[in-house]
Image (cartoon, rainbow, N blue to C red):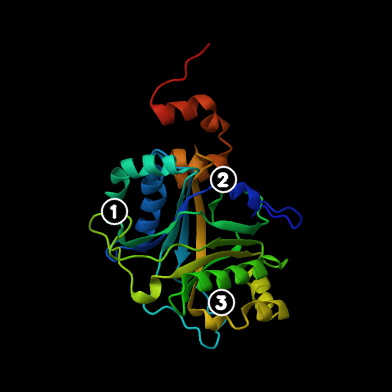
């Protein structure tokens, strides 16, 4: 069960992530979904976690079997055409020099993408992302935690990035002010440039159509789909979305099937050290020896911890 609170806001714990990126992920059509998800979580995840410089690394797995009411239909706003995703990734840094260290070493990571991904698109967030509210006590989830989580992708109705960002920012703050919304994290990336495709992964697609060059992503969580549905019918939600079509032309919501945290505050989580599923096994069995400093040191360095 998720660790929730209605009185404490944990959003400040994300403030150290000064530079971020949000990468959309589409699995290779020849890789079965279960194999893809397992490889991404337990093979690619620990590899990425060990690349120097990382301060923050989270995989969000998305479900294609989503209900029809993840986000209400609105006049003048339509879904992105031909837009399917299997995940979203945050890779963040505490400082520019950390990002430089990562960029110098990242070839060993991006060479792995072709094993499972058909397309990845890294949207740059040089000023970071913003967690407006977070009432979930667990800082580093490694599971489907039972919450009703959604990643809402919005696309601009025009090319004015400033006006688009300002309107989406107002929407996010209005959502965050409501008790029914447990979490709001906003990503307002730079306009994507196909002339400079990112990330630099060989044999993987990195181009987007015109309508996906200027986008925003809102990471939302509710206690349940019922809470979400009731909130969408509220006066507060209607006020928050009034006139949205003037700046937003596209809206595609994606249901989250699991959130897996590998690095937080420049430190490997248990999932980052061991893989997501092994970390879950350790927790379920209460194997405290597996989280002791001597075991952690051995697995991280390949050497035994010196005794004094």
Side of 38 relative to 235 (left or right):
left
Q: Nearer the viewer, residue 224 or 72?
A: 72
Q: Nearer the viewer, residue 160 or 262?
A: 160
The structure residue drawn at horizontal position 53% and vertical position 76%, both measured from the top left corner, is: 67
Q: Are marks 3 and 1 in contact (CB under 8 Å)?
A: no
Q: SS of the residue at dot 2?
A: loop
Question: Dot 2 corresponds to which residue?
Answer: 16
Q: Position of residue 78 (x, y in %)?
A: 47, 83
Side of 181 relative to 25 (left or right):
right
Q: SS of the residue at dot 3?
A: loop
Q: Which callout, 1 or 2, points at the residue further toward the start of the chain? A: 2
Q: Position of residue 95 (x, y in %)?
A: 48, 42
The structure residue drawn at horizontal position 47% and vertical position 15%, both measured from the top left corner, is: 306
- The extreme left residue here reads 203
Question: Dot 3 corresponds to which residue?
Answer: 71
Disc 2 residue crowd, few under 14, some 14–19, many 20+, Cα 10 Å: some
Question: Dot 1 corresponds to which residue?
Answer: 200
Report the quarter where the N terminus lies.
bottom right
Side of 89 relative to 243 (left or right):
left
Res. 274 mark: none
Q: CA distance from mark 1 to mark 2?
A: 26 Å
């Amino acid at each position: 069960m998720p660790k929730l609170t209605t009185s404490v806001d944990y959003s400040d714990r994300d403030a150290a992530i000064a530079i971020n990126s949000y990468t959309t992920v589409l699995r290779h059509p020849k890789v079965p979904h279960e194999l893809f998800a397992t490889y991404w979580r337990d093979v690619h995840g620990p590899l990425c976690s060990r690349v120097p410089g990382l301060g923050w690394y989270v995989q969000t797995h998305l479900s294609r079997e989503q209900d029809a009411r993840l986000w209400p239909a609105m006049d003048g706003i339509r879904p992105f055409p031909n837009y399917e995703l299997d995940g979203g990734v945050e890779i963040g840094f505490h400082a520019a020099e950390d990002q430089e260290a990562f960029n110098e070493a990242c070839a060993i990571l991006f060479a792995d993408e072709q094993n499972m991904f058909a397309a990845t698109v890294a949207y740059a967030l040089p000023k970071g992302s913003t967690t407006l509210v977070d009432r979930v006590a667990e800082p580093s989830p490694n599971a489907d935690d039972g919450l009703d989580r959604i990643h809402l992708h919005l696309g601009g109705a025009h090319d004015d990035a400033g006006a688009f960002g300002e309107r989406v920012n107002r929407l996010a703050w209005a959502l965050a002010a409501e008790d029914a919304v447990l979490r709001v994290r906003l990503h307002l990336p730079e306009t994507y440039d196909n002339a400079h495709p990112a990330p630099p992964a060989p044999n993987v697609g990195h181009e987007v159509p015109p309508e996906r060059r200027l986008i925003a992503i809102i990471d939302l969580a509710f206690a349940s789909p019922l809470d979400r549905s009731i909130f969408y019918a509220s006066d507060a939600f209607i006020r928050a979305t009034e006139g949205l079509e003037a700046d937003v032309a596209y809206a595609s919501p994606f249901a989250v099937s699991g959130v897996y945290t590998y690095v937080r505050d420049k430190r490997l989580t248990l999932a980052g050290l061991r893989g997501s599923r092994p970390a879950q096994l350790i927790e379920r069995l209460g194997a405290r020896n597996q989280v002791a400093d001597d075991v952690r040191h051995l697995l991280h360095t390949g050497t035994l911890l010196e005794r004094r």
